[in-house]
Amino acid sequence: MKKKYLSLVFLVAVVSFTTVFFSSDNYNLKTEAATVQENKKAVQSLESDLKSIQDSLASIQYNINKAKTAKENQLYIKSQLDQEITLTETKVETLEKLIEEYNTQISEREAEIDAKNNDIDDALFIIRERLILQHENGNSNIISYVLGSSDFAELLTRIEIANALFEYDKNLIEKLTNDRIELTALKDELTSTRDKCTESIAELELAKSDLQVKIDESIAYINEYRKDEAAYQAQYDAKASEMESIENEIKDILRQIELQERTNYSNDEFRFPLAYDATYWNTGGFGWRVWSNGRKTDYHKGVDFAAARGTPIYASNSGTVILHRNSPSYGLYLIIDHGGGVTSLYAHCSKLLVSTGDEVKKGDKIAEVGSTGDSTGNHLHFSILENGVHVDPMNYISEP
């Protein structure tokens, strides 16, 4: 009798030590007096906290994506503005080269005009000198030449020659003058074109200044969006860390429940979660994968069975519904606690047919297949967790 008493005392001591060990303040666990139901309620409360954090993560991720999109838009705008400035600078360089060419041509025309002026001056000087000489000699040269004719026919010939000489002088002066006028007009045209180029350069420089202002504004926006993105990412990381902490907390409470109840539902064989004659496709296994839309590799924490919307979903084993809710990722989903730290999760349902706290038997209809939450088509996402850790569900079930 004394031996049995000592054994009983030892067993109570072990249970008390185990309960106290898993009752750390870090995990908000109950004392040794806590019931299994109280610890399940604690799990439900933590799951609720987890949902709130998941919702916050979704909201923060939206803000991260929004800031990233805004930043990328501004980067695109800045690249376009940079191209415009490069094009403007190219135009300015081209116009500056044109101005240099116009200045060269203007200098050449000015030199030609000066030469024509010199030719005109030289011709006028020769004519003037000849006229002065004729005047001083009393026009003896031309008059003697004309009057020295021997007959009337020769007189007419000499008069014609004299007129031709005067006409030559007149035509020479007119030609030189016209050449100068044409050169001056060409110079004025070149000058006008050069001045227009100069005005265009001034306009382009002003446009370049305006573009630079826009670039500076774009850079300021980019820096702000980068700060926003970094701030949101820091928030996201903090929430993710908090979620991980709560998940660890849930794991420890589930271990506590296992020590308390030692329920052996999970020792029963698990069944396939759809009807054995249902039409379905296994579209996603457990483990690492790369999504077809190019998103980065992720770790798939269950298996996916594609089936028609409304296809019945059955409890894979007996247990208690410890969670049913709607989330951005899993959509309508529920979790069944089978005891022994083993839980099963059924996600993306179109309809849930049981509620938190319901006791279900293996094979009970609990939900219907759908495509709620982050889903690309009607399917059942089925997960098995051991003490809060996802394991390969195919270790528990077999496909029919």
Image (cartoon, grey):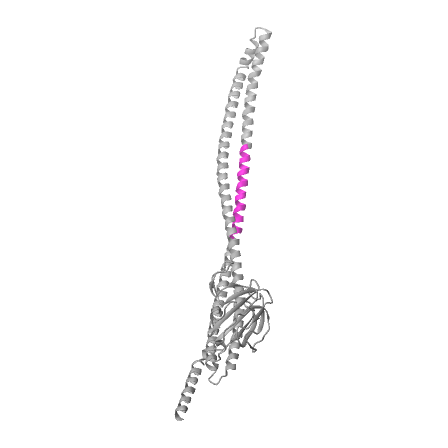
Residue 105 coordinates in the image, percent (x, y): 50, 34
Q: Nearer the viewer, residue 298 or 229?
A: 298
- Quarter of the image where one finds residue 315: bottom right
Q: Is residue 243 left or right of residue 352?
A: left
Is 202 contained in the magenta span? yes
- Quarter of the image where one finds residue 374: bottom right
Q: Is residue 174 visible?
A: yes
Magenta residues span 186-212
Where does the N terminus fall, quadrant-wise?
bottom left
On screen, residue 60 above or below 321? above
Q: Nearer the viewer, residue 53 or 15?
A: 15
Q: Residue at x 50, y 50 (%)?
A: 82
Q: Nearer the viewer, residue 380 or 131?
A: 380
Q: Residue at x 49, y 32 (%)?
A: 108
Is 395 contained in the magenta span? no
Q: Predominant secondary structure in magenta?
A: helix
Q: Is residue 217 visible?
A: no
Residue 85 coordinates in the image, percent (x, y): 50, 49
Which residue is outermost to the top? 150
On screen, residue 128 above or below 25? above
Residue 323 coordinates in the image, percent (x, y): 54, 74
Q: Report the number of numbered marks.
A: 0
